Image (tube, grey):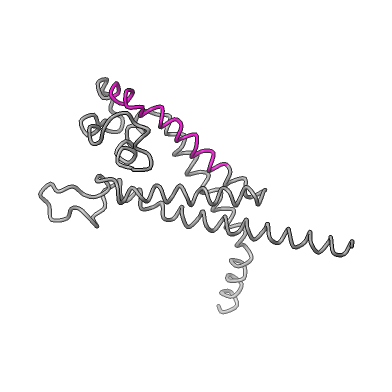
Amino acid sequence: MKELTQNLLVQLADAQRYFIHFIRISIFIVMAWIGGLKAFQYEADGIVPFVANSPFMSFFYSKETPEYAKYKNKEGEVVPENIAWHQENNTYAFSYALGAVIIAIGTVTLLGIFNAKLGVVGGLLTFGMSIVTLSFLITTPEVYVPDLGGPDHGFPYLSGAGRLVLKDIIMMAGGLVVASDAAKRLLEGNRVKAEKAAVRA
């Protein structure tokens, strides 16, 4: 049993670089999927509370906060009046652009498997995007359970939206791990080049 445990530990340690690549693949899947969904009405409507309340992003919209509360669509719901409001608000145009950015970050992170420089950039961009997303825990009222008469509301009682946002702390950690791995590969490559240059000299 002890030998079996030791072999497992050795295999896990030896596979670390593959696990780091798996983090890159995971980041790409999440970003490509969620970024792609930004092209659809229900997803664009769903991010409005986050964007409208964010000091980093609210200027992309033309309507004042919290006017959006009167024009919320449930997921899968199509209310022409609400959609017209969102069109005037630039909800959909912004969502398309945001989706493209998210997909781009995921793609650059994935390419870090093959290119260490891109790996550093992708990892740091993932980290930065996660900071913006996690800031919604401070700026967006909807991330906490509203006071509807129950005893559990407000901070720290996360709503469904809040629980979704909090998960980005894992993306933040993943971004740093892959950026660190790519930086290590770059440094090792530079060291090898320097040693070869010294030998030739």
Q: Residue at x 54, y 58 (%)?
A: 177
| Above-or-below relation of 66 to 165 | above
How many numbered circles does the render carry?
0
The span shown in magenta is 83-107
99 falls in the magenta region: yes
**Residue 157 in the image, given as x and y percentages of width and height:** 23, 55
Q: Residue 54: x and y, percent?
A: 33, 42
Q: Quadrant of residue 60?
A: top left
Quadrant in which the C terminus is drawn:
bottom right
Residue at the far left in the pictured view: 149
Magenta span includes 95: yes
Q: Is residue 26 above or below residue 199?
A: above
* Vertical relation: 48 (above or below) 151: above
User: In what quadrant of the picture does the N terminus appear?
Assistant: bottom right
Tell whether 63 sits left or right of 97: left
The main secondary structure of the magenta stretch is helix
Percent from the top left, x then y, of residue 199? 87, 64
Q: Position of residue 87 (x, y in %)?
A: 33, 23
Q: In front: 73, or 192?
A: 192
